[in-house]
Image: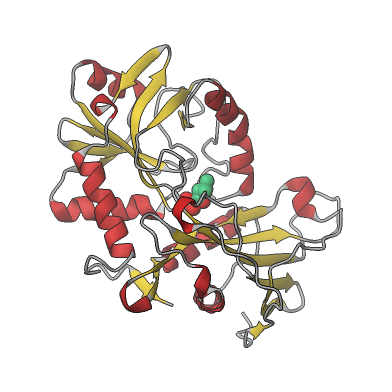
Amino acid sequence: MNMEEIKIQQTDIRKAKPDQSNLPFGHYFTDHMFLLDYNLEQGWHEPRIVPYAPLVLDPAAMVFHYGQAVFEGMKAFIAKDEQILLFRPNKNMERFNQSNRRLEIPEIDGDFIIHAIQKLVNVDKEWIPSGKGTSLYIRPFIIATEACLGVRASHTYQLLVILSPVGAYYSEGLEPVKINVESSYTRAVRGGLGTAKAAGNYAASIKAQTEAKDAGYSQVLWLDAIEKKYIEEVGSMNIFFKINGKVITPELNGSILAGVTRDSIMELLNNWGVPVEERQISIEEVYEASLNGTLEEVFGTGTAAVISPVGELFWNNHQMIVNQGHIGQLSQKLYDTITGIQTGLIPDTLHWTVQV
Ligand code: COI
């Protein structure tokens, strides 16, 4: 990739910053964004930071018709001495390229994109919130821009990075969420897009999510597409169960997203000597554990969700209340540790943070 210097065009108009005390997720955007173009002749080229503004795209741009779009989710935090920290950005870039390969999008130079993100975050650094549980959410994404209605890989793309000051992903915050176990709709199937962070996976999830919301649940827990038996993920997060002292999370089976927080949690648990198993786990096993009193904790993990305790699972007319609807001790310790490392309050012995 062409490592051209990133041009910066500063905005003349600064937007008002949102109230930090009650930040929703993903409603506010900063003053600037990063752009990078791709065509067959030049590859990825013309990196630039420009004022945040709507895009002009041809109505025939392939992203609108065939959904060739991938994204990532990262966060920047204000640590002590006004230091700005990113969390494991190289992991996101590895996954960005895995998604690119699956969707026939040209790969990017991850180090260069991290460099661009550092520049962009620096330009908009006064937007990074500092309240507890807040951060600057970073959304890199790539869209197919060629005007063509033939079904094939686009010949042109745009990579963008936008920034959003955020609070907790779920309005419940650290209050446990209620989750409906989805037995009709399917998120992904092996060989499909499930392991890629493709926009289409989220489109596939919306109907089930709306129905779950209408029934009083925050999210859906997806089961495998074939047997509707094995647990996959929540869509906005990976899922962990603590049963009889052991922590279990579904293995990466070809239809589950490899979460960066998921990986970090497993490393922390291993370091703490907490038994952790990555394996197939059926919803029946969880139900049995709930009946016999060994289902101790359930929590989701994700960049946006961080650690999100689950207080109730609803499956097949069975209601499973977890830890009497309260956050479990391990979930709380994981939340405190991961956010502590991210914000520099806990020494980063695993070298996960990167300074901006
Ligand atoms: C993230 O955790 O960063 C994600 O991309 C999930 C999304 C549903 C907000």
Q: Residue furthest top?
A: 317
Q: Quadrant of the N terminus?
A: bottom right
Residue 67 position, x and y percent, is 71, 48
Q: Would residue 65 be found to the left or right of residue 126 on screen?
A: right
- Taking the image as shown, residue 126 lies to the left or right of residue 311, namely right
Q: Is residue 79 left or right of residue 69?
A: left
Please state the horizontal and vertical placement of residue 33, each as a whole percent of the image. Answer: 64, 70
* Colour theme: secondary structure
Q: Residue 352 appears at what percent x and percent y?
A: 32, 67
Front position in the image: 6 or 191: 6
Identify the residue at image location x=65%, y=72%.
Answer: 14
Q: Tell me the quarter of the picture where residue 77 sits.
A: bottom left
Left or right, 48 with reference to 17? right
In-front residue for pair 109/178: 178
> Farthest bottom residue?
5
In this rendering, the answer to whether 124 lies above or below 139 is: below
* Tally of numbered tags: 0
Task: Look at the image and tell me in which quarter the C terminus lies.
Answer: bottom left
Q: Quadrant of residue 129?
A: bottom left
- Seen at 51% across and 78% down, the residue is 122
Above or below for 52 versus 309: below
Q: Position of residue 318 (x, y in %)?
A: 37, 13
Residue at 24 percent across and 45 percent down: it is 332
* Near-viewer residue (225 or 242): 242
